[in-house]
Amino acid sequence: MAEDLQINSSADKAEQYRTLIPQIAALISGEEDLIANMANIAAALKEQFRWFWVGFYLVKDEELVLGPFQGPVACTRIKKGKGVCGAAWEKAETLVVPDVDEFPGHIACASASRSEIVVPVMKGIEVMAVLDVDSEYLSHFDDVDADYLKKIVALIYG
């Protein structure tokens, strides 16, 4: 596939995801390198939605370690159960946080981040990584984002 995305920012959010998912699937199809695929997924999401920060943290030895991302510099390591990413890892569930300042134990990697969604990347029943997305706007993420981002991360080990 050509490495150009067809960006449709005028459609509603669900339609943007429906247009983007097959493009991401084609982009990572046949590529076995996890880091390369995560890098392209992060870039595609950032390009489509213009989020403040989008990237992955990989589970390594009882910590989440920063992986491929798009946006400003980020926290490098996160303990299990700490912050939104660590909580999503520990619970193995997607967390949508409308206001990060109200999340107990939020880790402020960037002060401009106001809302966040974290989606576990599963391989079978094991969390292998998390997709972390931050917005500079309050209440930016919802169930539409959660549903479609789960579909996108499922492509990684699909």
Image (tube, helix red, strand yellow):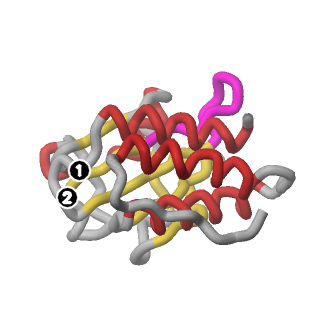
As measured in the structure, the alpha-carbon distance from the residue carrying label 2 to the one carrying label 1 is 9 Å
Q: Nearer the viewer, residue 23 or 62?
A: 23
Q: Is residue 21 magenta?
A: no
Look at the picture and state if 48 lies above or below 28.
Answer: below
Which residue type carries mark 1?
A: His
Pointer 2 with pointer 1, Cβ within 8 A:
yes
Answer above or below: position of 130 versus 93. Answer: below
Specify the principal SS of the magenta part.
Answer: strand
The local crowd at label 1, few if under 14, some if 14 to 19, many if 20 or more residues have their Cα within 10 Å, is some
The quarter of the image holding the C terminus is: top right
**Is 77 left or right of 31, judged from the image as shown?**
left
Q: Is residue 123 magenta?
A: yes
Q: Nearer the viewer, residue 113 or 49?
A: 49
Residue 24 image point, x, y percent? 64, 53
- Amino acid under label 2? Arg
Which label sits on residue 114? Answer: 2
- The answer to whether residue 69 is above or below residue 65 is below
Q: Residue at x 56, y 64 (%)?
A: 6
* Residue reaching furthest to the top: 125
Q: Which residue is mark 1?
A: 140
**How many tags in the picture?**
2
* Image position of 121 (left or right of 29): left
- Characterize the local packing of mark 2: few (<14), some (14-19) or many (20 or more) Cα atoms within 10 angstroms: many
Answer with the quarter of the image where residue 151 lies: top right
Residue at image position (49%, 70%) is: 70
Residue 93: percent from the left, percent from the top? 44, 28
Q: Position of residue 35 (x, y in %)?
A: 71, 60
